[in-house]
Image: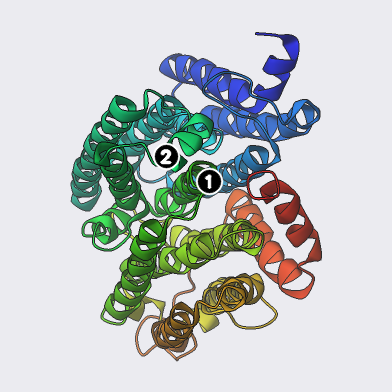
Amino acid sequence: MSFVDLQAILPLLVTAYGGAVLMTLVAFAPGRRFAFGGALAVLIAAFGSIFGAFPASPRQATPLLIIDPYSLYFAGLVLIASILVTLLCHRYLQPREKTSGALFALIVFATVGMITIAASAHFVSFFLGLETLSISLYGLIGYTRRRKQSLEAAAKYLVLAATASAFLLFGIALIYLDTGTMDFLRLGPLLASGERSMSAYLGLVMVLVAIGFKLAFVPFHMWSPDVYQGAPAPVTALIATGSKGAVLALLLRLVYTTSTAPKPWLFAVLAVLSIATMSVGNLLALLQTNVKRLLAYSSIAHLGYLIIPLIAGPPIGPLSIAFYLASYFATNIAAFGVVSVLSAPMEVGEVEEIGEYRGLSRRNPLLAATMALALLSLTGIPLTSGFFAKLYILSSAAQRGLWALLVIAVINSGISAFYYLRVLIAMYTRADGDQTPFPKPGAAAALALGFSVAVIVFFGVYPTPLLKLAEAATRIIAP
């Protein structure tokens, strides 16, 4: 491996070696502050190394990884998400776990998995990245051991992840059996030749099912809301953003690098998944009284929207997904960040029920405004980044004549406004009982929330810089 190859994979090297060193040091100094500072330093250094890796891209650094503007864009997104989640964990863990150092090391290792997935050009690296991410999330989800819901959520996530891995391995085996390769770039021409047996296509379907479990597409979503509810609120933010974003980046690369010729059956399957996912997610969200479960079903619905530009194809499809994910990351971290701050003083439970948010605007106006802005962005209201994110998704459907998907997406957006409105009404309604002020965020959490709000507002008013960045990143996989 040459120096340029090492330069290209610098973000991955910094994160992996930094995580290993941090985990070793935490064994001797398990204190929260030391681990928090170490994790933050590693993640910030890894983000800075992206600028050092960029001159070496695009480059196939190893047979398993490709470093290009696309993978670096998503590496940047997941690193920012991990940094913000780390900031949210600082105060949240204080009353819950005395020795919480390992949690911060697990966040770093989860980030290693996410970066590996986003840079994968081979099924082997995809599987290794996915397992690194999943194993880290087992520990993160069940970290608050005194909370039974957290342990239950970890067990359920273990079953979901194991099922996804089984489908993925079986699918990879079938693809390799028929084509003799697991490389994405070599797989495309082989599938397009028309000389493949049904086993290769069955393998692709099984890989798609595995990805469906990881992204919580309907009907593979069943325990995902339980995981969102049971996991610590900052960890839920990481699952909803970085974890989903990395796998979606992989799906986008896989579809566009292996589909050298149109595959009507694949797009038909994706269309059915899109309709089912956004409709079921929104309809079930209407029934929720728990804020975390509501946001979980909302996340499922948003992934249904994201399938539409995947079907629409280049150039607007990949661009829409890249822009949408940046907005979606900031919005969800803001929403789950408010839950984290409100729950910080509690030793076991969390502030989850919608009724508990009644009167929040009087008891902590800034937190209420942050949550309101996040919900408005998720709805797609103008002057938020979520508005432009949904606009580009609907535009991709219109440009390709996907009118049925466009109409269903608009109807679902209208449905989502109702359950977001329930939370807004609760926050801005006077509470009948206790008027004790809610806790204020610590400096770390305030920084995370402030950054998320700034992204939502800035790109809601002036989206051009992010659009140009997303266009430059996605041009290489879908010119």
Q: Position of residue 272 (x, y in %)?
A: 33, 68
Q: Position of residue 243 (x, y in %)?
A: 45, 46
Q: Residues within 10 Å of mark 2 (few under 14, many from 20)?
A: many
The answer to whether any part of residue 463 appears in the image is yes
Q: Are marks 2 and 1 in contact (CB under 8 Å)?
A: yes
Q: Position of residue 154 (x, y in %)?
A: 24, 43
Q: Is residue 287 above or below residue 302?
A: below
* Extreme-top residue of the structure: 1
In the image, taking residue 389 as reference, residue 431 lies left or right, namely: left
**Which part of the image, by quadrant, shows the N terminus?**
top right
Q: Which mark is on residue 202?
A: none
Q: Residues within 10 Å of mark 1 (few under 14, many from 20)?
A: some
Residue found at x 49% / y 88%: 428
Look at the numbered disc 1 and give the secondary structure of its residue: loop
Question: Which is more toward the observer, 465 or 461?
Answer: 465
Question: Which is more toward the observer, 213 or 326?
Answer: 213
The answer to whether any part of residue 107 appears in the image is no
Residue found at x 36% / y 28%: 179
User: Which is nearer the N-term, disc 2 or disc 1?
Assistant: 2
Residue found at x 53% / y 33%: 185
Task: Quickly name the residue at label 1.
Answer: 260
Residue type (three-letter) at the residue carrying disc 1: Thr
Look at the numbered disc 2 and give the secondary structure of its residue: helix
Residue type (three-letter) at the residue carrying disc 2: Leu
Q: Which mark is on residue 191?
A: 2
Give the CA distance from mark 2 to mark 1: 8 Å
